[in-house]
C-alpha cells in the first residue's frame, strides 16, 4: 500500500516545463535537466528531452537512476484547445492510467498521475479538521494584517466621501469571516 504524501515526492508539472522553456512554440526539440531541492541542497535530477511531433502531440523522455538502476522513461503529452479560445493547453498522459493530468509524481521508480494511487493524499489532507480550520483562520488573520499595513500608507484612505473604500470594505469582510470562523472553531476544539 502506498503511504507517502504527494507533496513529499518528486513532481513534474506542465507549468514547470513551460517555465523552463520546454514548451515553447518555436522549438520542436528541447533538452535539459529537471532538478529538485530540499532547502539549499539538490536532492535529485533527471535528464529530460521533449520532442514535439506536432502542435498537438509531444513526447517527454526522462533519463535517470532509481536505486542504482538506469531508467529511460517516455511520457506522452497532448494538447487541447483552451476553453478561453486562445492557444492550446498541454497535458501529460499518465503512463499507468491513460488519463490526462497536469502533474506527475515519482512514486517508486516511475512518474505517474495521482489517479494511479486513489488513496494518496497531500499532507494537509491528512491533518485533523480542527487544525486545518485553525490554519485557515491564521492565514486570513495574516492577510488582514498585511491589508492593514497597506491602509496605513500615506495616501491610503479607509473612507472616501463618507463611504468605506473598496479595499477597506474587503478588510472588514475578512475580519467578519475570521471572527465567525474562530467562534465556530473554538467550541469544537475544546469538546
Image (tube, rainbow, N blue to C red):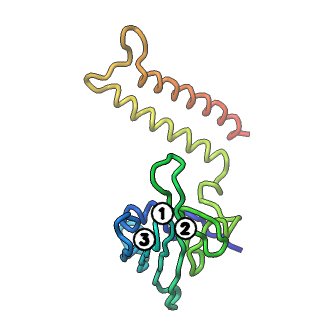
**Foreground disc of the pair 3, 1:** 1
Using the rendered view, name the quadrant where residue 42 is placed.
bottom left
Secondary element type, mark 2: strand
82 lies above or below 155: below
Q: Is residue 9 visible?
A: yes
**x and y percentages locating residue 149 in the rendered image:** 35, 31
Residue at point 60% right, 68% down?
Answer: 113
Residue located beneath label 2 in the image: 92
Please give the label number shown on residue 14: 1
Label 1 CA crowd tier, 10 Å (few <14, some 14–19, many 20+):
some
Q: Are marks 1 and 2 in contact (CB under 8 Å)?
A: yes
Q: For the residues carrying marks 2 and 3, which lies nearer the camera in this image?
A: 2
Q: Position of residue 147 (x, y in %)?
A: 40, 31
The residues bearing labels 1 and 2 have C-alpha atoms spaced at a distance of: 8 Å
Residue at 59% across / 69% down in the picture? 93
Which residue is tagged 3? Answer: 36
Quarter of the picture holding the C terminus:
top right
Which residue is the extreme one toward the left?
154
Discs 3, 1 touching: Cβ within 8 Å: no
Amino acid at each position: 500500500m502506498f503511504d507517502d504524501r504527494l507533496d513529499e515526492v518528486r513532481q513534474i508539472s506542465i507549468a514547470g516545463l513551460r517555465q523552463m522553456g520546454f514548451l515553447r512554440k518555436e522549438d520542436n526539440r528541447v533538452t535539459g535537466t529537471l532538478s529538485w531541492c530540499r532547502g539549499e541542497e539538490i536532492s535529485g535530477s533527471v535528464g529530460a528531452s521533449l520532442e514535439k511531433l506536432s502542435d498537438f502531440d509531444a513526447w517527454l523522455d526522462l533519463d535517470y537512476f532509481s536505486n542504482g538502476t538506469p531508467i529511460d522513461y517516455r511520457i506522452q503529452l497532448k494538447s487541447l484547445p483552451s476553453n478561453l479560445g486562445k492557444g492550446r493547453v498541454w497535458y501529460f498522459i499518465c503512463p499507468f492510467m491513460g488519463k490526462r493530468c497536469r502533474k506527475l509524481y515519482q512514486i517508486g521508480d516511475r512518474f505517474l498521475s495521482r489517479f494511479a494511487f486513489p488513496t494518496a493524499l497531500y499532507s494537509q489532507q491528512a491533518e485533523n479538521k480542527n487544525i486545518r480550520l485553525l490554519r485557515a483562520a491564521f492565514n486570513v488573520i495574516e492577510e488582514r494584517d498585511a491589508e492593514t499595513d497597506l491602509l496605513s500608507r500615506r495616501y491610503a484612505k479607509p473612507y472616501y466621501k463618507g463611504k468605506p473604500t473598496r479595499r477597506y470594505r474587503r478588510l472588514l469582510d475578512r475580519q467578519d469571516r475570521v471572527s465567525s470562523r474562530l467562534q465556530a472553531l473554538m467550541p469544537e476544539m475544546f469538546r
